[in-house]
Amino acid sequence: MAVVLALRVFTGLAAAALAAVLLEHYGLAGSPSPAPLPQPRARRSPQPAPGPDGSNIFWGLQISDIHLSRFHDPGRAVDLEKFCSQTVDIIQPALVLATGDLTDAKTEEHLGSMQQEEEWQTYQDILKKTRVMEKTKWLDIKGNHDTFNVPSLDSVENYYRKYSALRRDGSFHYVHSTPFGNYSFICVDATLNPGPKRPFNFFGILDEKQMNKLILLDKESSRSNHSIWFGHFTTSTILSPPPGIRSIISSATAYFCGHLHTLGGLMPVLHTRHSQGTLELELGDWKNNRRYRIFAFDHDLFSFADLTFDEWPVVLITNPKSLLYNCAKHEPLDRLLHSTHIRVLAFSLFSITSVTVKIDGVYLGQAVHLSGPLFVLKWNPQNYSIRTHNIEVIVQDSAGRNKSVQHIFSVQEDNHLRFHPIASLILLTDHYIMARVFFVMIVLIQLTILIAFRYRDFPNCEGPPGFVIFTSFSLHVLSKMNIFYYSVLLLTIYTVLGPWFVGEITKGKLGCCFSFGIFVDGHFLQGSVTFAVGILQLVFFNVPLMAYLCWSLLQRCFGHNFRSHLRQGKYLKIIPVHLLMLLLFLWQAYSCFFLHLTYGTLAFLLSPLRTWLTLLTPVLIHRAWTVSPTELGTFIGQLKSYLSS
Ligand SMILES: [Zn+2]
């Protein structure tokens, strides 16, 4: 009966959790009057289409996750200086978007975090020395590293306000005006305020007020030919209230971001498309990979290329654009069919000597220089009106350097290509929701097992008992002995509800960290990374500890004490169990050390889930091995009856 009841409770809770998540995910819960969603722009005429004119085109650059560091890799700064001088001089972008993590803000041993004024001074020195702000519009925004340990926006620690080009906290709208229309660049600032130290600073948060501001900025941009939104975080790492950040930016042609650093090289390309049509284009980091991006609007057709610093020539085919990145909702794609020329932007340290164009492997001709970096070649798109085709452009400069780029294009609007499914999964999954669901599920499963076995009778066993019976038996013993039952129950419930530690969350501000979020200085920062940390705690400590206690109690019921169970000779079975528990215990002990490094001595001392648990665990394990045989009496009798059956 008890099992059935526990199962019912568990199923009910799980269903409620799932329903809440789905409601939140699809924006059905929360705000009673959801904000009006952006409307697609009015459809533009097929003219002017790309032709032999030098106008109706501009381009810009993006750079992300620079991580200037006073301790590591001085090359980041050296190369950034060269980027701001040489690269910017050659490419002459209309604007440069620097999408956060301008500085590294870590301590020397790489584990702790704090703002390092020296890093910010280096950044400002580079901007000043290269005069890049006079050459182009340099839009630099904050990333999570730029807000590590910043107690408030007004604090002196907020060096972004002192040393950046923009010095402007919060989201904003920048308009790039051209004779052929306005182009909106809207920054999404989801960095945390106050900014906790690492690692609880990985996700961005937008509150109701910030969302309303973004809706206003979106309205302001509605008359622009295009809007590009940009921010540090991917949309999958931003917590936002309904209708959610992706709905707010659905009027954008593309959202540019950084933050994920190619996932340590695992995903060199992280691009996808939202269900509302907006492209989400994460850019790899400058820190280790020296990536940057060139993007262009040519007759309102959007194109871009992700590049590696100091590799020349730089080539971008602006017409015909890549089919994969078509944005039918915002681009006048029929201009492609009406275009008279293939258009290519080509830049190099030396003069460009040839721009060769091939379609489907067939030589089409040499593009001629029009003006600046623009090269054009006459073509008849009608010849390619069916199916998709491959365009290849080979650019050579006078130093003999070659660069070949190619992509699939289509002059019809009804052809589509799919993005890499893993990239889409990474960029379109709301990771904090996933973490929350997994966390709750693990807790519910553990609690259900614990409670069910406490109130359930020992099962009958016919024939010699096997692994399942022994496991079930040991769970009965653990759950039916008050000291172990209440210890494990308390630990699980405490992991969910109790404060994990109290400490200096951000400079000079004490706060309290829970699984569901962090309270600091009158603010509540919703849980995100905390749930992931909670999952690690459950999977790599709480649950294994429970299993280890079960196993130890089973040994006791066999009549062993700690010494005698070692002497029974089954070393291959026994040693791995103890080693694994020791390893997990050391990991738990290391997490106390890590807490000390990241959040200081006070957090180390006032951390029930870390230091206190580390101290209490040996006591509990000792108890399991020393509990008197009389207390185990009934269980020993039960085990004997199994063994004799
Ligand atoms: Zn970064």
Image (cartoon, rainbow, N blue to C red):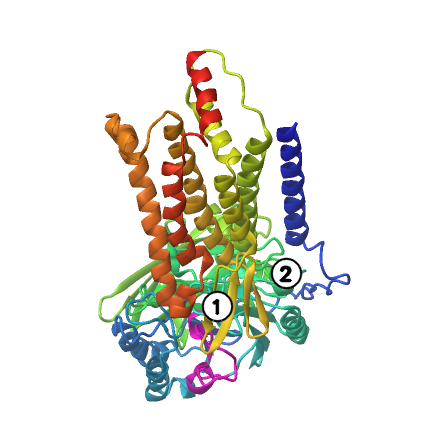
Query: Residue at label 2?
Result: 244
Q: Secondary structure at mark 1?
A: loop
Q: Where is residue 177 drawn, in percent x and y?
A: 57, 81
Q: Which quarter of the frame holds ligand 1?
A: bottom left
Q: Where is residue 109 drawn, in percent x and y?
A: 28, 67
Vertical placement of 533 versus 572: above or below? below
Label 1 – label 2 distance at C-alpha: 17 Å
Residue in front for this viewpoint, 500 or 408: 500
Query: Residue at label 1?
Result: 232
- Marker disc for residue 77: none
Outermost right residue:
33
Q: Residue at x 43, y 34 (%)?
A: 550
Q: Amino acid at mark 1?
A: His
Cβ of mark 2 under 8 Å from ligand 1: the answer is: no
Cβ of mark 1 under 8 Å from ligand 1: the answer is: yes
Q: Residue at x 59, y 74 (%)?
A: 522
Q: Amino acid at mark 2?
A: Gly
Mark 2 surroundings: few (<14), some (14-19) or many (≥20) residues within 10 A: some
Q: Which residues are magenta?
A: 139-167
Q: Where is residue 413 drawn, in percent x and y?
A: 59, 52
Quadrant position of residue 81: bottom left
Q: Is residue 373 left or right of residue 485?
A: left
- Magenta highlight on residue 150: yes
Q: Secondary structure at mark 2?
A: loop
